[in-house]
Amino acid sequence: MVDMIVISIQTSYHYSVILPLLEYSKSNPNLKYLFLEWAMACNLDQAEQIYKAAANRGLQTIVSLQGRKSPYILRAKELISQGHIGEINSIELTGNGGWYGYDRPNKSPNYIYEMGNGNDLVTNTFGHTIDILQYMTGSYFSKISSMVFNNIPEQDIVDDHGQKTGQKVKKSVPDHLLFQGTLMRGNVPVSCSIKGGKPTKKFTKNLVIDIHGTKGDVKLEGDAGFAEISNLVLYYSGIRANDVPIANNGDKYNTQPKTDMNMYDAGKEIMEVYHLTNYNAVLGNIFRLYESIADFHYNTKKIPSLPSQFLLQGFEFEGFPTFMDALIVHRLVDSVYQSHLLGSTLDVTNISQLPNFTA
Amino acid sequence: MVDMIVISIQTSYHYSVILPLLEYSKSNPNLKYLFLEWAMACNLDQAEQIYKAAANRGLQTIVSLQGRKSPYILRAKELISQGHIGEINSIELTGNGGWYGYDRPNKSPNYIYEMGNGNDLVTNTFGHTIDILQYMTGSYFSKISSMVFNNIPEQDIVDDHGQKTGQKVKKSVPDHLLFQGTLMRGNVPVSCSIKGGKPTKKFTKNLVIDIHGTKGDVKLEGDAGFAEISNLVLYYSGIRANDVPIANNGDKYNTQPKTDMNMYDAGKEIMEVYHLTNYNAVLGNIFRLYESIADFHYNTKKIPSLPSQFLLQGFEFEGFPTFMDALIVHRLVDSVYQSHLLGSTLDVTNISQLPNFTA
C-alpha cells in the first residue's frame, strides 16, 4: 500500500529505474505521488520520456527544485508580485561554488566530473538558480545567449586536509557559464555569471542576485553559489502601500482583496533585511517541499478551489514543482548548451508550453 | 606656431572638421599633437577614415579614453600585472548611469538621445569602461556576444527640479546593454550589464568591476556607472611577495629587475583599500592624460628607449591612448551592435590588429 515513491539515486540511473517502475506500479492502485530529485535525467530526451510516462500514468509528480520553497525566495517573490519594487527593469546574478574548480577531493566520485551524467554546472547549479529566478519574477525567458567554459580540464587531487597529492585527473564538465537573456515579461535584461569551484570571492558574496525595479530593489546574498541549499540574506528597498495589503497578482489561490496600485505613497520608502540566523537551508527547503505535498494531500489550507492534480506549479505560491516545471528547466538547460555550441542567441519563448504527450 | 590641436566638439562634427583640418594644417610644420575626445566619430567607417588621415599626416594622436589615467585603474593594473591576484579567471562588470533613463531634463540636447551621433550607451558608457577593463587586464577579447535594449523608447521631460512636465519625447538610443565575452589572454569569462538612467541601485554600487584571480580579487566601485569620470574605491585582497618588488610584466619601459613568482609566500594574504577622498576624477583623469603628453614631449621620466611616436599605447603604463587604441574600441563597439543584430557570438580576435592604411 505505497502512496508515494521517492527517487533519490544518481541522476544517471533515473531513466532506467523510473520507466519500469511506472509500469510495475500499475498493480498498486494506491500510488498517487512520485517524487524525483533534480535533475530529472541526463538529457532532455530522457527527461521528456520520463515526463510522458508519468503523465500517462496519471501520478502527481514532484521534483526537488526546492529553492521555490526557500523562505527568502518566497518573500522576494511576494515583494515583487505585490509591486513593491515596481516593474523589474534589470537583473544581475553571479554565483561561485561547486565541485568544478582547481581541486578535486580524493573521495569525490568521478561521475560528477564527466559530461552526460546530469550533474554539471549548467544542469545543477544554473538549473536550480534560474528556476528560482523565473519563479521569483513570474516570467520565463524569451531570448537567451550563453558561453560555456571548461577552463580547468585537469584538476589536482587533494587529500582530506585539502593538500595536493600530486595526482592530476581530467574533467569534462564545465567550470564557468556566462548566460544572458531577456525575460518574456517586460523584456527584462538578465545577466548571469556562474563559476565553479569552491567559493573564493573576497569582496562579493559567492551568490548575489540583484533584482532592480522602477521603484526599488531586491537583493539576495549567500555564502556559496547554490540558492536552493544556502541560507540567504534578503535585502529589500522600495515603497510600501498605505498599510493596506496589496493584491497578490501571482497566485490565483490567494483570496485577499485586490488593491489599486495608485494607493502607494511614493514618499514612504522602506527597507527590509530578512535573515533567519539558524535556518538550515539544506534540510529546511526540502522539508518545506514535503510539507507542501502534505498541505496539498490534506488540503491543510482549506483552499476551496484546490485542483485534484498540479500539472504545473508555474509561478503560483501554492503547490510544488512538478515534472512539467522540471521539463521546462531541462529545456532551458538544453538551450543553454545549444546556444553555446551554435554561437547563437536563441528564441526560447516556446519552451514553457505544455507538451501534448498524452493525446 | 601651433604645436597641438585639441578637438572638443560634438562627436557628430568630428569627421567633417578633422579631415579638412588635417589637410589645412600641412602648412604648419610645428604641429605635432592632435588630441581628440572620445568617441572618435559617429561610426566605425568615419573613425577609420579619421585614423587613416591622421596616420598619413604623421601626427602624434591622443584620444580622451582618460580612464586609463585614473589612479585607481593604474593601481588595479599594477596589482594584476605584478601577479598579485594570480591568473584572472572571471570578471563581472555592472554599471548604472547616464541620460538614457525614464526622465529627460528639459535642457538636455536632443542629439544625445538619437542613434547615429556617437553618443550612446554602447559607444560612450561601454566604450570607456571596456577600454579600461582591457587596459587593466592587458587583454583584448576573443569572442563576444551582446544584447542591446531600448526598453524606454519614450522619456518624460522633467524640469529643473526633476518634476515631470507632462511632455513625452522619443528616444532611439539604447538604455541597456548585456555583453559577455572571453578575454584572449586566459580565455577569461567576462560578464557585463550596463544600464542607462540615473544611478538608482540601493544595495549595489552603481559601478562594480569584480576581477577574480586564482590568488586574489580586485574590486572597483563607483557611485555612478562611469569608470572614467568617477571617483572610485579599489579593494584588493591577495598575496604579496616577500617584500621584494615584483617584475612589471605589462610595461616594457619599466626598468625594475624581474623577480621570480616562486618567491611569493602564499601564507601572506593581504588586503588593501585604496581611495583618494578628495580626488576630482572628472578633472583629474583628464589632467593626468595631458600630463602624460607633457611627460612624453619633454621625456620627463628620462626613459632612454622612449619612442619618437606612440602609435598605440596598448597595455603599456607609459604613454596615452592614441587613435589606434580608439579605433580598436570603435571596432569592439561596432561588433557589439553587430552581435546584437545578428544574434550571434562573434570572433573579434582580429580587431586589435594594426591596419596598414598608410601603405
Image: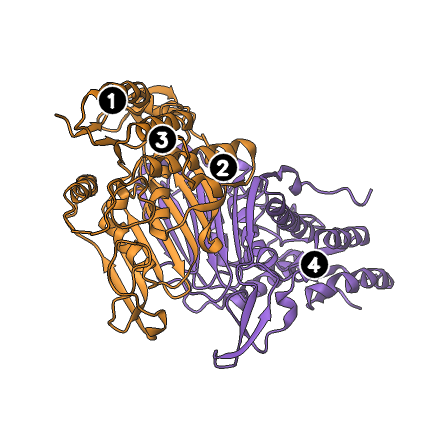
Chain colours: A orange, B purple
- Secondary structure beneath dot 2 equals strand
Marks 2 and 1 belong to one chain: yes
CA gap between label 2 and label 1 equals 30 Å
**Label 1 and label 4 in one chain:** no
Residue A194: x percent and y percent?
A: 39, 40
Considering depth in this image, is A318 or B157 the residue closer to the camera? A318
Query: What's the mark number on residue B42?
Result: 4
Do marks 3 and 1 both belong to one polypeptide chain? yes
Which of the 4 quarters of the picture holds residue A227? top left
Q: Disc 3 to disc 4, how far (Cα)?
A: 44 Å
Q: Are marks 2 and 3 on the same chain?
A: yes
Q: Amino acid at mark 3?
A: Tyr
Q: Secondary structure at mark 3?
A: loop
Q: Which residue is mark 2?
A: A147
Amino acid type shown at disc 4: Cys
Residue A264 in view: no
Which of B182 and A335 lies nearest the eye of the viewer?
A335
The amino acid type found where label 2 is placed reads Met
- Depth check, mark 2 against mark 3: the one in front is 2
What whole-number distance in Å separates the C-alpha atoms at marks 2 and 3? 16 Å
Q: Position of residue A107 (x, y in %)?
A: 24, 22
Q: Is residue B78 left or right of residue A249?
A: right
Q: Earlier in the sequence, mark 2 or mark 1?
A: 1
Task: Give how far apart the Cα atoms at labels 1 and 4 are.
Answer: 58 Å
* Mark seen at residue A100: 3
Q: Chain of mark 3?
A: A
Q: Are marks 1 and 4 in contact (CB under 8 Å)?
A: no
Marked residue nearer the N-terminal end (3 or 1): 3
Q: Is residue A270 visible?
A: yes
Between the residue at mark 4 and the residue at mark 2, the CA separation in whole angstroms equals: 30 Å
Circles 3 and 1, Cβ within 8 Å, touching? The answer is no
> Label for residue A107?
1
